[in-house]
Image (spheres, rainbow, N blue to C red):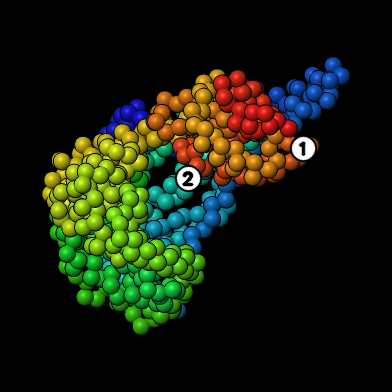
Amino acid sequence: MSTVDEARLSRLADFARTHPSRYRTRVALLAVLGYAYLLGALLILGLITVVIFVTLYRFRLASAGIKLGIGLLWLMGLALRALWIRLQPPTGMPLTRENAPALMDEIERMRVATGAGPLHQVLLTEDLNASVMQLPRLGIFGWYRNYLQLGLPLLASMTTDEFRAVLAHEFGHISGRHSRFGTWLHRVSATWHRVDAELRERPHGAQFIFTKFFAWYAPYFASYCAVLSRQQEFEADRAAAAAAGKDAAAAALCRIAVADMYLGTTFWPRVFRDTRQQPTPPAGIYRRLWQESRAAVAEPRADQWLRGSLGAPTAPWDSHPSLAERLAALSATAPVPPPVEVSAADALLGSAADRWVEPMSRSWESAVDVAWRERHQQFLRNQERLSALEAKGFLVPLAGDEELERIRLVHEVRGMDDAVPLMQAFVDRGEQNAEVHYNLGEALLDRGDEAGLAHLQTAMELESGFIIEGCAIIASYLAGAGRPDEAVPYRAWAEQHARVLNVAHEERLTTNLRAGDRFLPHGLDADQLQALRTALAMVGGIKRAVLVRKEVSAMPEVPHWIIFVTRSGLRWRSDSEAAGALIERVLHACEPLGGTQIVATAEAQYKRMARKAAKVPGSEVYPALGKRR
């Protein structure tokens, strides 16, 4: 995100706080503008098409008119297809009065208490979340259908009073028509992103009609929507406090923050560690989750997790305010909630649990089965390789790469506790490896050892790919240790690096490959060139390949390779699938180059660029000199 975007978001947040009604009107007008521009472009394209057909027909240039007209008609079809966005209803296991009477009674009580409209379907999901969705039956003409999704992990991790606050929050969205308005805004955004995606896939000479507007409109509209979404969350929190009590609303927010950390850092990692011993996924995983989730707040790190969540600020594009802001708006404190003796799932689903737990568990087993088996087989291979390395290490000191491999394998086979002493010994010898410093730093901080800060700092300095995650770990640790001010520079560093990554990503998109780009010599040595030529020869179907580096402003240390290939043999106008398959094979062959890569056939819009690249000294990498066919 640019500093311009951040400044705009800050101004919008201030305006939304002081003028909520006017702000909502502005967002609605912006949404209307998005549709109006698309409809206006349709009208103009239609008029131009008619004028072209009529004019060129009069001058007996019908064939040229047909070509131009077809291109414009394609753009019109694109716009019309984008306007017809069908939003899919949410998924989950249906809950009814027949299969969950106590839960449905509780839902109805809170719906009446908040003055929300009727619910048409309640769905149970596998997420630690609750949400409402309002979808129109008649598209732009409305007649909305209300859905409520409830996550089983959510029900299992909190008390019934806290769950009532969650329900009241979601019904606050319905009574305030937030979800209905949000659905409309999402439809506008989806419409324009569909136009953009199709134009990226199939560029058109007249696409500037849409792309210039989208480049301005998309971030501007997203800024307004992000701020509006946060304001609506505050309104829904007030509805929760009014219907279920301020203390229950605050406790629910804190409970969810701790449960989220518990599931992400403790429960699921513990489950997947079983791939070492078990060749297949365990049965009844959601029964286990139901039983263990209530104890999340009893974990030794629960207080640290909560402090970390409280110290995390609202990111500019977040759709939800930070936990600290939400609690402050409720004038509530944030103690770690006590352990749950009887969860909302126990009280409201009770003995009927198997009806939900078993299908969810079987679905999870099916979803992870292949990956689980692969991880188990990989564990066995790692175990065998580690034994071989350790046997060798008894005889002779392991070389640098083998020592790094041993450290990695000990981590994967025996766990972090066994790997930490090896990593510590490695860095104590003065070895500089970003991955080792990163893993050691994370492990030490996880134990509460601040020596981990220096190791993470070193990892980020050695390799920029660790900056965002490393800063997040450090900031979370410092916030959890009650030192949120010290976390600020790390969050700023991560945000700055994210901006650089965004610029680098944009520069390297295929759609941003321009005739005016500066192409540089590839700089490969003889061994690298030979390896590349061998790989390209195995691809087949290539007559010639030209390799250059594109000059980029962001992250120039990461090379951006452009490979233009000339296909061999006869080609037909309808062979785009064959060209795409060839490009995929060439990309695979070029993977050892590292960096980022674009492969293009030296045809159509890339023909001139390919000729320009061929003029760069040494750019023709295939076939080798003297081996032209």
For this rendering, which residue is in front, 262 or 157?
Answer: 262
Is residue 256 visible to us here?
no
C-alpha distance separating marks 2 and 1: 47 Å
Q: How many labels does the image show?
A: 2
For this rendering, which residue is in front, 61 or 33?
Answer: 61
Looking at this view, name the residue that lies furthest to the bottom.
351
Looking at this view, name the residue that lies furthest to the right.
60
Viewer-nearest of discs 2 and 1: 1
The quarter of the picture where the C terminus appears is top right
Which x, y percent locates residue 300? 17, 64
Label 1 secondary element: loop
Label 2 secondary element: helix
Q: What residue type is labelled 1?
A: Gly
Looking at this view, name the residue that lies furthest to the left.
482
Q: Residue at x 70, y 41 (%)?
A: 541
Q: In this figure, which residue is indicated by the disc labeled 2?
A: 186
Which x, y percent locates residue 278? 40, 74
Looking at this view, name the residue that lies furthest to the top.
59
**Placement of 78 over or under 147, stated as above or below:** above
**Placement of 255 over or under 487, stated as above or below:** below
First in residue order: circle 2 vs circle 1: 2
Q: Residue at x 39, y 31 (%)?
A: 557
Residue 103 is left or right of residue 141, and the answer is: left
Which x, y percent locates residue 466? 32, 43
* Numbered circle sitting on residue 569: 1
Q: Residue at x 46, y 43 (%)?
A: 185
Is residue 585 visible to us here?
yes
Q: Which amino acid does label 2 sit on?
A: His
For this rendering, which residue is in front, 135 or 337?
Answer: 337
